[in-house]
Amino acid sequence: MTTIAGARVFDGNDVLGVASVSVEDGVITAVRPGAQETGDVDGRGMTLLPGLIDAHVHLRGAGNLGQDLRHGVTTVLDMFSAPPQFTAVLRGRAATRTDEADLRSCGLMAGAVDGWPAVIVPPDPSGWHMPGLSAPEDAEQFVTERVREGSDYIKVFVENPADVDRPVLSPETVTAVCAAARAHGLLTVAHAPTCWAFRAAIEAGVDVLTHVPLDGPLDDAIDDDTDLTGLVVCPTLAMMRARADARSTDDLLADPRLLAGLDREVADALRAGDRGHVPVSDRPGTSYAHAADNVARLAEGGAAILAGTDANDVPGHAAAVLHGASMHLELELLVRAGLSPRAVLRSATSLPAGVFGLADRGRIAPGQRADLLLVAGDPLTDITATRDVRGVWRSGVRLSTTF
Ligand SMILES: [Zn+2]
């Protein structure tokens, strides 16, 4: 048994004050309020949180998951990786390793024949190629195949045909994908980075919207009588900022704590100006201010906001949005957009766990999986304190690294 004593505890919903947390066989066995105990780990002056959940990443290699864990991200929700055999290998690793973050994945994303995202996925040597949908009738087969591959939810690409130079799904096909997923008991997550796409995704009945309109105010994306309390949105502000502003990597470079868990080559490449393959959008009206204002509006209106980065770096290489490091930036951007630190910490722990049915994690309570993050200072008053990582436990096993 391990006991972490003396730390302030945020349990995923509320601050418990100073408490002792005991862990045995990968599970939290006791949470005792009070500062009187001593434990195996001295958490005085620190804050203990549930391990963070990044609700939007793309996996490009196993190294992504190690980088996530080093930054206190104990679970990632993959929002499209390919081919299916690759995703299956990562699932297998996650089931057995304690030095990488755990994952859930949609597997392949629903998109049009010859459209995004099929155009970025080359056929593999075995002859496998990315499937596309051309009509609502294709939805059931697409979802059935993903269920067979082990997808945990369904991702669908929603864009205005006027905005992309490739075929896109018709609104009827998006609606059919949502219905097919629902019939299989799966949530649908929609890529929706514009006002047009946001509106279309809501009208199609998706469960979770990811990204947030970058090209205009929310009023252009919803009707006056839209019930915001019914929306779940993962804004990916780190990516929205990268899409709107070429200097977005300055945010990473400005804080040594964000670089500390990266490979030296990655940090050096960032300093040299390498921001990976994410281009700055040339779409008219694009402004990061729209994204931040829209998050504020959604939160004020009662929408559930989930923290997610859209990290997509190839392991060992720089990118504008990085696994692990950019999650801490995302938390800060959500606070700067107007959410309270407490709301933001919920958006990275108990809230995504609840939305995605991860009943065993996202909270510090007896019986929960011991995925924990110990940081110096108090992120409830200064959200950037989450970057001061002093300990990470995945299923009760402490990550052995020098913090
Ligand atoms: Zn994405």
Image (tube, helix red, strand yellow):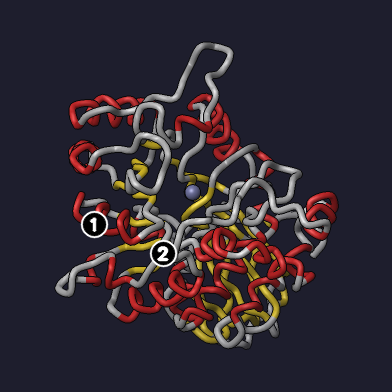
Asked whether disc 1 touches disc 2, contact meaning CB atoms under 8 Å apart, the reply is no
Q: Where is residue 403, by image quadrant?
A: bottom right
Closer-to-camera residue (196/258): 196
Q: Position of residue 277 (x, y in %)?
A: 64, 46
Give the structural element (helix, strand or loop) at label 1: helix
Note whether 175 is above or below 302 in the view shown: above
Q: Amino acid at mark 2?
A: Asp
Q: Hey, which quadrant is residue 285 in on the image?
A: bottom left
Q: Residue at 79% across / 70% down in the picture? A: 256
Residue 274 in the image: x percent, y percent? 75, 52
Q: Residue at x 53, y 56 (%)?
A: 281
Q: Earlier in the sequence, mark 1 or mark 2?
A: 1
Residue 301 in the figure: left or right of residue 60: left
Instruction: Examine the rendered structure and indicate whether residue 307 appears above or below residue 206.
Output: below
Where in the figure is residue 177, as x and y percent of width and height? 24, 38
Q: Specify the label residue 215 is tagged with.
A: 2
- Residue at the far left: name it: 225
* Residue type pointed to by label 1: Ile
- Determine crowd level at label 1: few under 14, some 14-19, many 20+ residues with C-alpha closer than 10 A: some
Residue 23 occupies which quadrant of the picture?
bottom right
Between disc 1 and disc 2, the foreground one is: 2
Label 2 element class: loop
Question: Where residue 202 is drawn, which disc sits there?
Answer: 1
* Residue density around tag 2, few if under 14, some if 14–19, many if 20 or more, within 10 Å: many
Left/right placement of residue 72 relative to residue 223 reads: right
Q: Which mark is residue 271?
A: none
Q: Residue at x 61, y 68 (%)?
A: 329
Compute the Cα span from label 1 to label 2: 17 Å
Whether residue 51 is visible here, answered yes or no, is no
